[in-house]
Amino acid sequence: MTIGGQSYSFLKLCYHGAVEGNNTARTRRARLSLLFSALRELGPRQVGYFALYRFGLLSGHYRRSTRSPERYSASQQVLAPARLFAPPDRLRLKEVIGKNGSAELIGAAEEVAAGNVHLFGGKPVKLELSPPGPLLHWTKYGADNEQGAASGISDDVKLVWEPARLGWVFPLGRAYTLSGDERYAAAFWSCLEQFLEANPPYLGLNWVSAQEAALRLLAMTLSWQIFAESAHSTPERAALLARAIGFHAARIPPTLVYARAQNNNHLLSEAAGLYTAGLALPEHPSARRWREAGWDVFHQGLRLQIAADGAYVQHSSNYQRLMLQLALWMNMLAALRGEPFPEESRRRLAAATRWLLALLDEESGSVPNLGPNDGAYILPLTGSGLEDYRPVLQATAKAFLGERPLADGPWDEMKIWLADIPADGPSSSQASKRAEVADSRPGRSPLPETPHTLRSPDGESWAYVRAAHFAGRPGHADQLHVDLWWRGLNVTQDAGTYLYGAPPPWGNALADSEVHNTITVDGRDQMRRAGRFLYLDWAQAHSIKVENDPAQTCRRFTAEHDGYRGIGVTHRRVVTALRRDRWLVEDALLSSRAGSAASGVHEACLNWLLPDWAWEVDEMNGLAVIRFSSPRGPVTLSLLPNQDSEQPEHAAALQIIRAGELVYGIGEPKPTWGWVSIHYGEKIPALALRLAVSGVLPLYFKSEWRLGESVA
């Protein structure tokens, strides 16, 4: 499940509010107003696709088109899955991951064999393969239940769906490739048979989403490539797997209109599932139709979803990685059968790779926790953790750029699975030929920079400034957020996501402006929240100028956004990278009403979110100096509300909140302040520094960061 699907719960609310007679006229008018706003910003095509999906549910069409057979053993022709590619050579795999990586891989496989998994890259939990509640036909759970309120569960449905994506097959398959130990093949077949028995076709929560069916299909197909020669892969099990792939593929076409309505990674996942099924079951009566539809829809999706500069439509680093993984899989399968990617698709994917590379912190392998992050990692063919983006970027750089941006390392494992096309196989394009040449050179390509990325002129720090012009619906209200990195540490953080579906106040609460490193005005979000997962009245940002001092003493980026235009306020931010890892962030709240004087008193609050480090504060004459003890040295922040402090309405108040509790200053904090979520479903304490000022416009803030040196 992805946030894109969840955002449509708002449209369902509008629809029911408009037609149900027990609502007041005022409620109906309000909901219709929201619906018209959604039509304006989402567009009639996406809303129309969603209406078709709703009609298919309400009319019973999907119920009829996905009738449930008794079990996998019936109602299907016996087919054998095809061998599409060979796993990496065992010696090559050992060479890439090294001795420590081999030991870690065997340990991970042993955990799965013992019945434990790490969901979303977090702590180990017991592997649960049976869904909760009764096994109803998937249409009986209802659209709202798809978002986590399904019969039989009270928490986020992602906690049910994640083990059903079969992510646990990857450590088993990688360990079997490395060692040849038949215990891992036995564990795979045992777990798969348990899952298929507990989740008969089209019954239960795990069939509600066609995307989930598609991702399982990819995992099952890859597993066959690994385990086909095992003694445990009997003809009966091969036939069982083929029938399962066929049922999963057949689940996708009836509701493809829903994926089109979302126009995000759902569409790409389902297209990849269809294309894969068409190759994996070449004798199936629907194989050609699946293959051709999957190919066409996938490349249409790439053109619609990747902007010319490479930014992905979901405004999320995690979803951009997911999209690139799907592209790697599709590119590999297509290349091996001599079907080159269209050049436009390759251009878009090259731009998307460069865009994400620009956000890579080389020392840690992480990127800013930008936008929705539900921990999706669909092809984890690597021992690197969920937060390490080097495996995907090294592989996609080879596949779509013909470059090697990173030095050799254990993160090369994904590349040898998905991007190292055999020399005697057909090449997908000239770009892949260039990749072979580039990969053989001892040097590597420098990381790209974007106008929104600044690097210290002579230091070890860099920053990302969020300044987006939305063409697709935003996931977070995060305009002019600043992520600051130093020596592999994420000094100023994005709080992440935590949970999509949870009791108040936690239902997608970390999407709000107030938890990002930006400024809120009068306690408002930058955009209008129209539901848990949908923003309207989008805040649009634009860059004003980028400056590089000829003497290399500073680099500066200036941008502003119009999210507070409704109250006559423009937020402008200037971020300057100075020498010796010093950073200056200057904020101005200006009147956006031309020719009019600033009217009324506004309250502005600047937020900075840092790791849970030891700290101390000095305040004097309006200046606050906060010193932190980081694992890599001292970090100092000097905060100054830069206006006439003699005006009483300009009095500033500093708060520090840790894990929802006030630890410095006065006032009542919100329980969602002072947390960060690296892994979906888990949150850890962080420090939220909030400096509030009230007064008439213009209002100013100045934040000076010193990394590695203290202020006396």
Image (cartoon, rainbow, N blue to C red):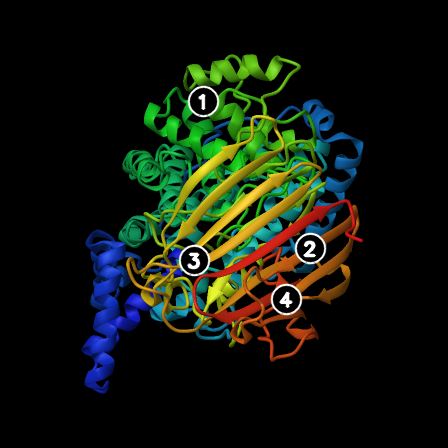
Query: Looking at the rendering, which quadrant does residue 288 occupy?
Result: top left
Gap in Å between the C-alphas at discs 4 and 2?
17 Å
> What's the residue type where badge 2 is placed?
Leu
Gap in Å between the C-alphas at discs 3 and 1?
33 Å
Of the numbered discs in the image, which one, if any, rests on residue 336? 1
Helix, strand or loop at mark 1: helix
Check the picture and name the quadrant holding the N terminus. bottom left
Dot 4 alpha-carbon crowd within 10 angstroms: few under 14, some 14 to 19, many 20 or more: many
Helix, strand or loop at mark 4: loop
Badge 4 or badge 2: first in the primary sequence: 2
Percent position of residue 324, x then y: 47, 37
Q: Residue at x 65, y 54 (%)?
A: 118
- State the residue position of label 2: 637
Of the numbered discs in the image, which one, if any, rests on residue 3? 3
- State the residue position of label 4: 674
Q: Nearer the viewer, residue 77 or 506?
A: 506
> What's the residue type where badge 4 is placed?
Gly
Percent position of residue 630, x then y: 77, 52
> What's the residue type where badge 3 is placed?
Ile
